[in-house]
Amino acid sequence: MDFSAGIAEEKIRAALQKGEFDNLPGKGKPLPKDDLAGVSDELRISYKILKNSGFIPPEVQLKKDMVTLEELIAVCRDDMERTELNKRLNEKIIRFNSLMEKRKISESSAFHSYRTKIDRKLY
């Protein structure tokens, strides 16, 4: 353990003994589930940085757009508008499939393990 980590540990121990952590919100409750629990340790920090900066991968944005369009189609009563929405949805599906094929993500073992988790979150 380096010097600064030792100092931090000592300050934490002292605060614990003084009871400074006794009235924190959420004390005694489980920690909130991590959105990135299924992501490997090597990738988690980079994903967290991208997420905190507001970056959304193109495939995730396309999936979100597809879900939104499907919801709009489900409640749309105007035939012409429904036709236009279906056209836009098909364009998004084609772009999504093309992007996935270019990246050869469908061949990745990681993609297969995360696919159901991703689909569950989006739907």
Image: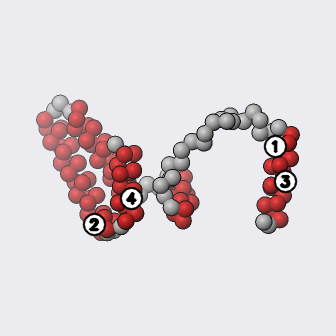
Left or right: 77, with 16 as reference point = left
Left or right: 47, with 68 as reference point = right
Q: Nearer the viewer, mark 2 or mark 1?
A: 1
Instruction: Give the Cα distance between marks 4 and 3.
Output: 41 Å
Give the residue number, with chain letter if any, for mark 3.
10
Q: Nearer the viewer, mark 4 or mark 2?
A: 4
Q: Which residue: 26% across, 63% down?
A: 98
Instruction: Give the Cα distance between marks 2 and 1.
Output: 53 Å
Give the residue number, with chain letter if any, for mark 4.
113
Choose top left, top right, bottom left or bottom right for residue 49.
bottom right
Which badge, 4 or 2, is on the more N-terminal residue?
Answer: 2
Q: Which residue: 32% across, 47% down?
A: 65
How far from the left and from the top, in percent, is residue 108? Answer: 36, 67
Which of these two is toward me, 45 or 26? 26
How far from the left and from the top, in percent, is residue 40? Answer: 51, 61
Which badge, 1 or 3, is on the more N-terminal residue?
Answer: 3
* Circle number at residue 16: 1
Visible residue check, residue 45: yes
Contact? badges 4 and 3 (CB < 8 Å): no
- Element marked by disc 1: helix
Which of these two is toward me, 68 or 39? 39
- Element marked by disc 4: helix
How far from the left and from the top, in percent, is residue 27? Answer: 69, 36
Which badge, 4 or 1, is on the more N-terminal residue?
Answer: 1
The C terminus: image quadrant: top left
Give the residue number, with chain letter if any, for mark 2.
101
The N terminus: image quadrant: bottom right
